[in-house]
Amino acid sequence: MGETTLYDEDVYAWSEQQAAALRRLATRRDLPNELDLTHVADAIEDVGAIELHAARSFIRLILVHAIKSWADAEAPSLRHWAAEIGNWHDTLIDRLTPAMRPKIDMNILWRRAMHQADLDLAVQERHDARALVAEALDASTCPIALDDLTIEQLAAKDLVGRIETSARRSG
């Protein structure tokens, strides 16, 4: 097997590095005009942006299901939500790279997750659970750190426990 490259290790960092290099080349006048390096750089940068967006989406989905699991502990969907958390966690572990970490704001994702959980619970007519979320959880500060989501063996019950602890402190 050959050497691993930055592309293999961290596609987000690779895309940023390659886009910057292409933008530097775009300023040169000795290259053929038909090379549209600015747009090629944008396209390569988009590769990393797509991966970052995917990682953020998986985090938000995990948080949504953890919130619903905490707020509606008797829901018929509880086991399904736990399975989804496990599936999304596995995918997150595969996609999250070191260069992405500083670009992930857990508090923003938490606010979005709380909003989505509220919408989901409204559709399911779980009014008591919606009220619990609105009353007991601090919408501005995520009680779950990114490191909590990236451990190898993540259990939905551990995330729910962190939310429970946070709710007790807020209440």
Image (spheres, rainbow, N blue to C red):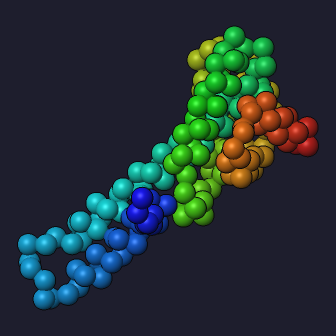
Q: Is residue 171 visible?
A: no
Q: Quadrant of residue 132?
A: top right
Q: Which is nearer the eye, 129 or 77?
A: 77
Question: Horizontal and vertical percent for residue 4?
Answer: 45, 64
Classify 29 as above or below 84. Answer: below
Furthest-front residue in this view: 1
Q: Residue furthest top?
A: 76
Residue 83 horizontal/vertical position (percent) = 64, 24
Measuring 48% from the left and 45% from the top, which residue is drawn there? Answer: 54
Please indicate whether residue 36 sits to the left or right of residue 61 in the image.
left
Q: Is residue 6 left or right of residue 21?
A: right
| In-image side of 44 versus 148 (left or right) | left
Image x and y of residue 113, in percent: 63, 38
Can you tell which quarter of the image residue 7 is in? Answer: bottom left
Residue nearest the viewer, comparing 163 with 157: 157
Residue 105 percent across, percent down from the top left? 62, 56
- Give the residue drawn at x 8%, y 72%: 34
Q: Quadrant of the C terminus?
A: top right
Measured along the vertical axis of the image, is residue 45 above or below residue 118?
below
The residue sitting at 76% across, 20% down in the picture is: 72
Q: Please tell me how many numbered marks the rendered image carries.
A: 0
- Residue at the (72%, 14%) spot, across then down: 75
Give above or below for 3 relative to 151: below
In-image side of 84 versus 15 (left or right): right
